[in-house]
Image (spheres, rainbow, N blue to C red):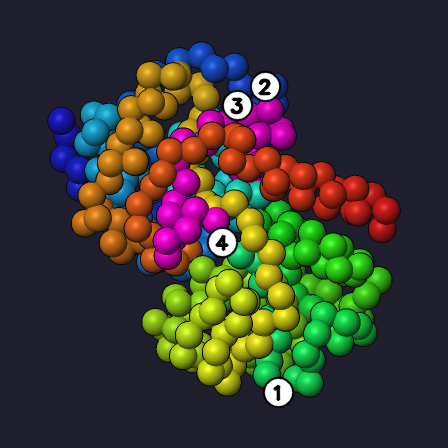
Amino acid sequence: MKSLAVLSRVWLILPLLAFGGSAALAAEKIDTLRFGLLPAEEAVEMVRQFKGIADYVGKAVGLPTKIFVSQSYNALIEAMEAGKIDVAYLGGSTYVAAYNKGLGVVPMAVARLQGRTYYKSCIITRPDSGIKTLQDLKGKSFAFVTPTSTSGGVGPRFYLNKNGINPEKFFASLIYAGKHDSVYLAVKNKKVDAGAVGDVYFSRWKERGLLKYSKYDEPNDTLKGSPDLRLLGCQKVPGTPMVGRGKLGKEMIAKITKALTSLPFAAIDKLRFWGATEKFVKTDHAFFADLVEMKKLAAKLKKKK
């Protein structure tokens, strides 16, 4: 087998033309296993964190590997559709979007982060903002991550709607910041009054010295002792899946799944761009049923705008 050192470079995915058509589950021979990542933070750092996983999986299936960091959520879906990516580490919403496009993507394993295979989308504001409830946000400025982000777009829209809030009509202004870091910093630096982020980033921001708090009380949606953030409420969403192109065939999908679910801690201990990852657990489409409904509601509300 070729040296596993092939994985140390960063490749940025430019928007690709979709080839169209449905992806039948027919085996396709590949000579390199290509991993795609969503743009959670700087590409070089993401590759550094993910390299141990790609190395291990590549060795298990007998293929050299490359890691690609996409420029956007949609670019990664387009890359999978064009057959440029074989395995992608996605947010749940991005997986459902790819599934709904008929791309034949197969959810293989879901990350267990901080003891959970789910995470939460939280509405955040500053403690000194005077905003204490969701209703206090009326006429304020608000930031989402992207329309397709699980915890920064689809999840919070579902949660706001559940509480009688139509973002386009309720807020004075609405922006898409592109990344969870960008939403948090926009709130912290008073660029917007509130925003939506995934709770798995709290510990990451604390490690980087960007956020202070004494304890995250997840069951009660509270950041205790934080001078930086107040949580106004959170919505539970399915965790982050590793998905494969169906065209790889059942045998290759099974091999990759087995490798992902048997990863030694040494291979994943650096993976922190969506929170401290403990392991990957086998999953299937049924796990994302609630998120499918959230996206249906989001699409319905968009048509009513």
Inter-mark Cα distance, 4 to 3: 25 Å
Residue 180 picture location, percent across and down: 52, 62
Q: CA distance from mark 1 to mark 3?
A: 47 Å
Near-viewer residue (110 or 64): 110
Mark whose residue sits in front, 2 or 3: 3
What residue appears at the point 62 percent right and 47 percent down from the top-left corner? 148
Quarter of the rendering containing residue 97: top right
Q: Residue at x 39, y 67 (%)?
A: 203
First in sequence: mark 4 or mark 2? 2
Residue 128: give its label.
1
Q: Which mark is residue 231?
A: none
Residue 81 is inside the magenta segment: no
State the extent of the magenta-drawn residues as a range.
94-118
Q: Is residue 51 left or right of residue 297?
A: left
> Are the two marked residues, 2 and 3, in contact with CB atoms closer than 8 angstroms?
yes
Residue 43 visible (yes or no): no
The residue labelled by disc 4 is 119
Q: Which type of secondary structure does the marked residue at label 3 adopt? A: loop
